[in-house]
Image: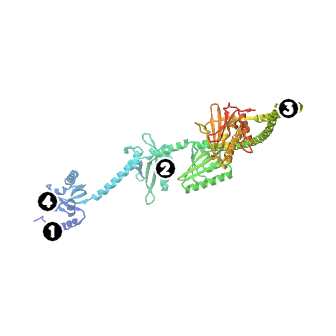
Amino acid sequence: MQGLPSSASATKALSQEQVVFEMMERIPVGTFVLERKPDGSAAFTFVSSGLLAMINADRDSVLADPDAIFHSVHPDEVADVIARSEHAFNHHAPFQWSGRAIVNGTTRWFSAEASPRERHDGVTIWEGVVIDITSHKAAEEVVAQSNRKMSVAALTAGVGFWEYDFKENRQDWDIAMLALYGLKPHEFTGVWDDYVHPDDLERVREGVLRSMATGDRSEQEYRIIRPNGEIRHVSAISVAGRGPNGELLKLTGVCFDITKLKQSETRLARIIDELPIPIGVCSTEEFGTILTSNKAFISTFGYSPEELPDVRAWSILAYPDETFRNYVFERWNASIAHALANGGMVGPLEYPVVCKDGTIRDVIFSGVIFDNIITVTAQDVTERRKAERELTESAERERQADERRRLLLEKKLRTSLAAAAVAHEINQPLSTILMHTQLALATFDSAAAESGKLRTHLADMAAEGARMVTTIEKMRSLLRNVQTTLEPVELSGVIHTALLYNKNLLSDHLIEVSLSGGPGHHFGDSPCRIAGDEAQLQVAIGNLIRNAVDAITSHASPSRRIAIDLIPMANSIEIVIGDSGPGLDNSLLDNIPLHTTKPEGSGVGLFIVATTIENHGGSLNVSRSPLGGAEFRLSFPRPSWGIRSRS
């Protein structure tokens, strides 16, 4: 029949189609052939094994029902698939779809494409391919999640990314960059200069141009102005991208919000500036740059920051003597080298510093090194050193005064002891002569008349003896009334000094001394001052201490103790000295001024004590001590202050 293909032709066509089907079967993707007749009916004429495996369907079901291939499409994707299919059929247009499918209960992603081809008999053929893109979608999702996380992190941290394309003359900012500048996407003008603080713009432009010219990385800090007028500090890093021929293609950068850091730096700088201790910050190089100095540094030394650009300028001003300056910096550089090797602490080192007004101040310098920057503190110890020198000088003056008092006391003692000894030695025999003379006179009336001459001699003897006694009493009176300068004297200090003078004596004889302030008081806890002669008082107290030592050691007392009480009373101050010696007989207590229990003693020591108490307007009482020995109670009147002389 005319118009029908011959049997051979049909066989050849079927053979070629079979070859095509076999090739499509071997492609590692899903392939299909769909025919649509002019009446609108459609059917799959070929479905590859790969496609059947993708959708978990059998060939017969798909060939019998073309809708069976869509049964695995995700419910949310069905409407999209149908719409795209109808558009392709109605307009003989290519079919394209990418979406989800559910296979064996698992969601997978497929991409399908088919191109229409119309045969001479009016049948439209779509030959298509289906690719499983699940792995690709998973990778895309990982990347998308990473990008989202990165954007959130950048937005949270205040880090923005930007890029300028020179070829297209276009600048792109990410969302974090826009947020940093306080802009919404539609508000960005595309011109970065519009947002930089005018005072920083020229400097920043120069930095960017330098980076573009050299290809080096640019790092700058500057201020930006947000649309609401808020000023923020940012740190920007940018790098230039070039093509194979060196042409400038792009400028890429990142921007950090450092406003809080700048605010912290400002607060820290303000705190350092207001600290009352002089502080300076400089680099660690020899004669390095002085970065800053606080108010206390300037006020202490007087030099302005303009006068101190570096450590060399400081050294010339602070240490004008070249030899001393070299010495200072030899020690300073050695201290820095040691600090760099051992934890960063410099000093302390003390030097005299010449201030701007010409005064010299004693200063202790200390420092700490961090990141090649040394922060130096300068402790002004001028007043402390002055006080120390004055204290040393005062101590020396006091020592010299003590020495003068000691020499004067020795002179007084030599005179007093000699006079007292002479008076004592003369008084005893004269008293005896006087006594016998008086007895002879008393019995004279019963003697013979011719004894008139004897009476005359006896009368003369008595008169002469009386005259000598009167002379000796005058000597004693003179000794009692030696000129005494009364000044404020602290009795606790007198006692301590007397103990100090007798320290070796007490130690050699293993004698324990206890000090007490009396009931309710501690020794020396309240002022016990009188108007007196400190030298005389020290000698008197020393005599009593030595007498107590002699009494304890000469009688082999089992207890070796001396108790000294300083007792403040309402109208007087008492010193009570007791010992653990044998004590004094009650019958001898009235003869204390010249009494002695020592075989070779003369009683002069106690006489000096009594005379000293009398010269100070006080009283002396002797009794038995609770320790078993003698107790001497010295009572002094409370003074009416003012230096005066007592005669």
Front tag of 2 and 3: 3
| Numbered badge on residue 220 | 2
Q: Which residue is drawn at 55% across and 56% down?
A: 342
Secondary structure under the numbered disc 2 in the rendered image? strand
Residue, disc 1? 9
Front tag of 1 and 2: 2
Secondary structure under the numbered disc 1 in the rendered image? helix
Q: What residue type is labelled 4?
A: Ala
> Alpha carbon of mark 4 to alpha carbon of mark 1: how far?
28 Å
Q: Which of 321 and 77 is in front in this view?
A: 321
Residue, disc 4? 64
Against 125, is 586 above or below? above
Q: Which residue is drawn at 31% across and 57% down?
A: 139
Give the percent coordinates (x, y) of residue 583: 66, 41
Q: Nearer the viewer, residue 12 or 266?
A: 266
Q: What residue type is labelled 3?
A: Ala
| Numbered badge on residue 148 | none
119 displayed left or right of 533: left
Residue, disc 3? 447
> Alpha carbon of mark 3 to alpha carbon of mark 1: how far?
209 Å
Looking at the image, is mark 3 or mark 1 earlier in the sequence? 1
